[in-house]
Image (cartoon, grey):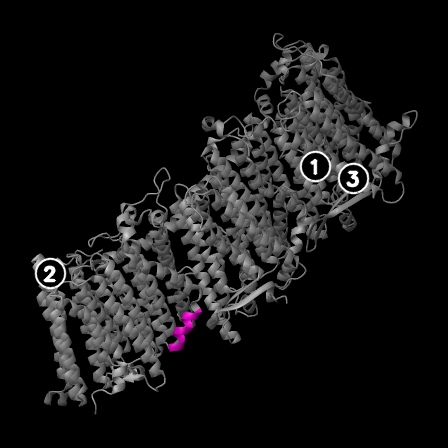
Amino acid sequence: MLLSQIILFPLLAAIILLIFNSKSDLLKQAALGLSLAELLLGAKLFMAFDPSTASLQLTENYSWISQFGISYSIGVDGLSFWLVLLTVFIFPIAILGSWNSINKSQKGYYASLFVLQTAMIGTFLSIDAILFYLFWELSLVPMYFIIGIWGGARRIYATVKFFIYTMAGSILMLLAMIYLILMHKELMGSYSANLLDWYKMQIPFVGGVLLTPQTLMFFAFSIAFAIKTPAFPVHTWLPDAHVEAPTAGSVLLAAVMLKMGTYGFVRWVIPLFPQAAQYWAWLFMVIGVIGIIYGALMALVQTDIKKLVAYSSVSHMGYVLMGLFALNQMGVTGALYQMLNHGISTGALFFLVGMIYERTHTRQIAHYGGLAPFMPWYTIAFLIITLSSIAVPMTNGFIGEFLILMGSYKSNPVWAYFAVIGVVLGAAYMLWMVKKVFYGPTGKELSGHKDHLVDLSAREWIILSPFIVLVFWMGLRPNDFLNYSRHSLEHWVKNQSSYTLDVKK
Amino acid sequence: MTNEYFIAIMLLSPLVGFLINGIFGRGRWGGYTSGAIATFFALTSFASAAYLVFGLTELADGPRIISATFFDWITVDELKIPARFVVDPISAIMVLVVTGVGTLIHLFSIGYMHEDRGVTKYFSYLNFFLFNMLVLVTGDSLPIMFVGWEGVGLASYLLIGFWFNDEEKATAGMKAFITNRIGDAAFIIGMFILFFHFGTLEFEKINSLVPVGPTLSWLSPLTLGTLLLFIGATGKSAQIPLYVWLPDAMAGPTPVSALIHAATMVTAGVYMIVRLSFLFAAAPYTLMVIAIIGALTVVLAATIGLAQWDIKKVLAYSTVSQLGYMFLACGVGAFGAALFHLMTHAFFKALMFLGSGSVIHGMHHEQDMRRMGGLKKYLPITYFTFLAGWLAIIGMPPFAGFFSKDEILWQSFSSSNGHWIFWAIGVLGATLTSFYMTRLMALTFWGQERFDKKHHHPHESPYSMLIPLIALAVLSIVGGWLGIPHVISEVLPAHPANVLEHWLEGSLVHPIAATAVDGGHADHAALEWGLMGLSVGLALLSAVTAYVFYIVKPEIPKLLVQKLGQAYELVFNKYYVDEIYQRYILNPLVKASEDLWLYVDVRIIDKLTYVLTDMSIGTGKMSKAMQTGNIQTYALYIVMGVAIILTIFFGV
Amino acid sequence: MLLASAADLIVASPLFVLFMGSLTPLIVKVLNKNKEPNNFLSMIQGVGTILAALLLMVTVYFLLLSRANPFAFSNLIAVDGIAIIASTTCLLLALASLFLMRDNQSTNGDQFAELVFLTLNSVLGMLVLVMATDLLTLFVGIEVMSLALYMMIGISHEQKLSKEAAIKYFVLGSFASAILLQGIAFIYGNLGTTSITVLTEKADLLIGQSPLFAVGMIFLMIGFLFKVSLFPFHVWTADVYQGAPTPHTAFMSTAVKMASFAAFARIFVGSFLVNHDSMLNILQWIGAITIFAGNAGALVQNNLKRMLAFSSVAHSGYILMGIIVIGLGATKLGMTAVMFYLVTYSIMNMGALAMVSFLEKSYSDEISTDHIKGLAYKRPWLAGSFTVLLISLAGVPPALGFFGKFFIFTQALDQGLLWLTLWAGLGSVVGAYIYLKPIVYMYMIKDDDQNEVISEAAKDHEVYNNRKWFTKTVVLASAFTILVIGLLNTLLYHLLSARL
Amino acid sequence: MLAESISEIGLGHFLVLSMILFITGMLGVLLRKNILTVLMSIELMLNAINLSFVAYARSLNQLDGQIIVFFIMTIAAAEAGVGLALVVAVFKRFKEVNIRFFEHLKG
């Protein structure tokens, strides 16, 4: 019942919040308390999880739409474990991050956050296709509102773009899922939407021919996930959504929502369509490489800090895609690690940008300059996160990028040669931004705000310190984290062409 | 076990100092407090290092190595990287240099920086650098080394941009980091190549797997891997084509230039090659490339150094040039010579930087040599120590630089990988070095006083700054006696042994079957003496010329400048390398990015989205246009629908 | 031979009750010297009648379950699974519509008694239609249903557009009925009977043999395509839905669609599409084009009612997919999918139009997106419910609308309708946009100072706080149902599936 | 077949006549501007259908068709009643019977 609790508790929290008075401070405190309670559930999961097996654990299975073999079936293994923890970890911080910046319709805001949490965790834990799809789509709705109501000037454009883009992708996925349900009936004699059953199917594959079931479904799923990831060239919703979203929205979008896409590749696409994945791996590696370089180049010329960070996300997620389609242990481990890293570094970056925006109400890089003397601690925090983002060793980012590059080198050296360009460009755009914002003479636009340029408050310290601790912890002791996923990943890689997953009794 | 503790103490004490100063000291402690703390931790580190090296000397038999494995850093699949640190003969030298020179520079900094607002920050960064440098030096695998490699780059970035309110300085820091990153990217790929060739990245294991004979193929993993590692080294050690960041890095405080950009960090590339000598030795093609690049850098940097006016810029180009020597040494297979020169260079170049720092301090942050001159009477101790450094760098016996440079020159001439051209270039470089260094001395300490006496009151520095100067001056003199060549030791009364060679025995691989040296001993002794004399003579001649040019007849340089015209312009503007990079690499990149953004993102991808939207809206408008409102039109649609369906059905 | 046996009368008893009950408001009015009786009372009479009919309907159904055949009146009508599902849904929808009529300005007031009468008779027609197992009763059902509707629209208090809508609907409806009837004539001539049971048995064979029979089938289908508004016979929909009083629009877009599709589905039970590719292709094309014409058409509308009208056209396209599935032989599964979709769609659309009805301040009010600006900040619960309904219409899980689509798509893919399903999927992406639009207006429009822009309509406390309780109930209840059944969709599915 | 159709008036003739009437009615709906005429055209279509029903009933030798015709006539009457009522209501208000008047709802 633990996993169900983790999934459904936020939903309950959202309902609980509805009884509070919209204006009271108590609402915020309650929201924070509830999210911390969810974090405790996460801790419980941490204790209950058995890292020594690749099997699916803590599974629950209830019949749901029985006529098509669809069930409420959830479970956790090393692939999803950290993503769930990341999600429960980041929500209390997101709520703290919204403490002063969200002043309107707070009740709706926090309720949306909690619904979002349910959807995200549900996505990571679902083992049933339709349940997965349900959570996947459900996550759109609160995010649509979060961007649309509490966002910036062009929020409507951004939020509708976000919704439609994702929906367009996921419809194809839905059709492919239905097709698989029917195929299971054809091949195995009964309807089933359970992923564990699907793994056992041998889906017909003919290399080089586009119109075979496996290839078609591979692409149907891939497009949905690639849009979410987002991979070049379907990434353009992301900068818009990021720029317009409120701080916590950007954080959650970057830290968790993008991971849903790459997680989809790990959990669904590659194990389900192994031959197609191997056949088309080059394509996705190329897309990953293009994403890395292209995202970095875009970030290089942005004038808006948030947009810069958004494009850096495109670049970072390019690494993840590349690592995944290296289809070897190092690449995939690196990709999984990079997902967490990106959640932490980009999440923190968005918080940092949000903090400074609250003080100056501008995000134009050109308006800044010489911030460091006014806000030294803020500068240090920003630098640390920047280092994590550009993958300096001893920070978490390095481990991920190193493993990914190594894995992709193993699978195809050429793409790795291209991908390291991203290492250079990443440093270039981030440090360029740091220089423009923090160094040099004080920006002209800032002179009016000097009174507001106070250093980090206690609340902001609380927000940032977990990130900073994690940056170094994950950078120095990656095995502490990798050990929890090791068996699952090994199993995943070793049995790639005939992947199955059993349930731990 | 105790060794592990001492390694831990050595590594971590600078880190502790960094954290203490960084977290508690900020804005609270003055320069003396934080300086004392930082120096204490640096000294602790030095003491542990000294203890360890002492322990190493006692391990006479068996593998001379002290190691400590703290934990497994990364373990994935076949990749296993333990956090293992070693002190062996090679790293011992570096450890001592790094912590020793480091401590001295910490000490120096107290006097130099104590008035600065960010002094606490400064000392914490300095400690941070020390930590990373030690990781780099003692790390027992390429990835661990890479940790320190990037870490020192980071420290360098922070310290170059230390006075970040000046945007130019902040930019210099950024430039340093990014240029280094280019090298690092190559380093990473090099690591991959080696890993997938050898299956491990730990030095010892690679050592045991390296093939015996040289690999004579450009495309072999060994050649490619080492080449890429070397590209990494060109970034860190400021060689062609990635040297451009180092002169700019002089934007940082002068002690930083001394420690990071002269004595230690920039030599990391050389150190890496020496450390992996077993690997590079097996890749002669790579060695050739290294030698060529090194030789070219020697001359290129030296010529640029001729025309600089900023005292620190001259020293910076000198550093680039000296690093070229070290690479030249590596390239000809004389790894020991490279390490030797690395060490002596650390002494005398740190000395000169600190000396220039003392000058700058005394001149109230004036760096232009045109506004100096005749300072020897104001700064006597600085002057005398600087003199020692000067003599060392121009290679006057018995100063340290003479021995190390001479060994490099001799090896580049005589070793099987060497060539007389390398030697000739080396001598040319030495001559040029001698010229511009004498020029520096002349412009700074000798001759007329060109500074504005109303504003500048040059004064000698405090003892905290002078003590390191003196210590380094002593080292610059005696440092070279560790490696006295056989030919000289034979004629000396006590026949002092070549301590360094003895120390490194067994740790370094010599790619050359040393037949050349062993064979005709007497002939070569004569040759060696001759070449030695030639190079010293040329250096002396060039020093005298410089003296004449800048003291005796100061109008000559001006005349020459007029005569040489464009050639001078070229040199004065550093061959326009920065401008070329800017114009042909950076600007196109930014322009391309902007174009990509405008065209691909905005005009193609988003446009395509809009096209799809427009198509939907267009369909909607068509659908809307059908709704004329007229009943009979609607009835007509029905009739037409009937007609069409019937037509299709009956296939008419 | 008796004209009708007792059993027949029992089967038809809901119809009698409906008709008798429909007279009560009129009788009250007449006895009251033609003065309009209390509207609430009239409504209660209507509601009572409907509930009674509902009860009887269910009773009859369970009574007939024990009998071998559920037919009555010499196989003219039957109370089988389709009939019971469709008729109960229609009755409930009529109930909700009566609530809306009671509250809406264009229907409340004068002639409300007549309106109740007409509504009940229209439902009566629907019941006949869905029970019809003979083409004759089918036609009679359609006509009773439609004629009552024409009148209902015609007696709206709004004078101009409603009259025009009535005329349009009437002329085109009669025209289409004529075509349908001509089809029946051809079928009768070639089949020798008008029994639908016989028709479904022999259709497959006869379509190939007799061109006239095929023409008859096509004409019959076209009659239905018109009623359920499929391209290109959908053009009347937007105009009539817009012109008609909103409660009637709600009634038409749900109950009429439900009844017509139920009857339409009956014809396809014979699965004659299997052997007649051209007919299959025609229907697929119609389905795909309808989905796009409807969704894209809604894209360019600002008038909410008109937008929902186009959306209802698009939904017909989805349901047609299910009909095609039935025609391809997956009778039971396809029928379940169709019925599921119809039921869910009816709930959503009823709720959405109830919301529109709620917003109307006078009988001539036309609700556009501007009217709902900032509604969420004045009426959070209603706006929330409307959001749920819209999201459900868009087919986003876990709202009920998703599962309707899911079952339809599943069956369509199972029958190999790959391209049609693909187009339907893409169409629903376009569709998502139109349902997002009202949400944007309700929640997200802000002025330069980041304050919510709230339309006058949304601010009007007098209208919104004190009146239209019934309408509000309908909105909230439908939203609630959507969410609850969304999660418990299996229950509904099995409930339907067991009947079919 | 040909001889037979010439010699004896059979089903085909009735059907053709019925179709002619039906199409005439259809054209009337499509083309006439007066709404009353349109209503009459619809009646004409219904009557054409009646004719075909009767013809079929005769040819099938059944009574069903004949009975259906009665139903249709009843419905047609009801339809005419409703239609006229609507037209009268409109006419009373707008003094307009032109079918092109009803074009306010569009787009």
Q: Amino acid at mark 1?
A: Asn
What number is the disc on residue A284? none
Q: Position of residue B596 (x, y in %)?
A: 45, 43
Q: Is residue A473 above or below residue C63?
A: above
Q: Is residue B608 above or below residue B246?
A: below
Q: Name the residue furthest right.
A: B494
Horizontal relation, residue C269 to residue C106: left or right: right
What number is the disc on residue B7? 3
Q: Residue at x 35, y 68 (%)?
A: C343
Labels 2 and 1 in the same subunit: no
Tell me if label 2 and label 1 are in contact, CB under 8 Å.
Answer: no
Q: Nearer the viewer, residue B515 or D5?
A: D5
Chain letter of disc 1 in the image: B
- Segment colored magenta: C490-500
Labels 1 and 3 in the same subunit: yes
The residue at which mark 1 appears reads as B132
Pick the quarter of the image with the N terminus of chain A: bottom right
What number is the disc on residue D90? 2
Question: From where the camera sits, is residue C353 visible?
Answer: no
Chain letter of disc 2 in the image: D
Q: Nearer the viewer, mark 3 or mark 2?
A: 2
Q: Name the residue furthest front.
A: C32
For the residues marked 1 and 3, what is the alpha-carbon distance in whole angstroms? Answer: 14 Å
**At numbered mark 2, what does the secondary structure look like: helix, strand or loop?**
helix
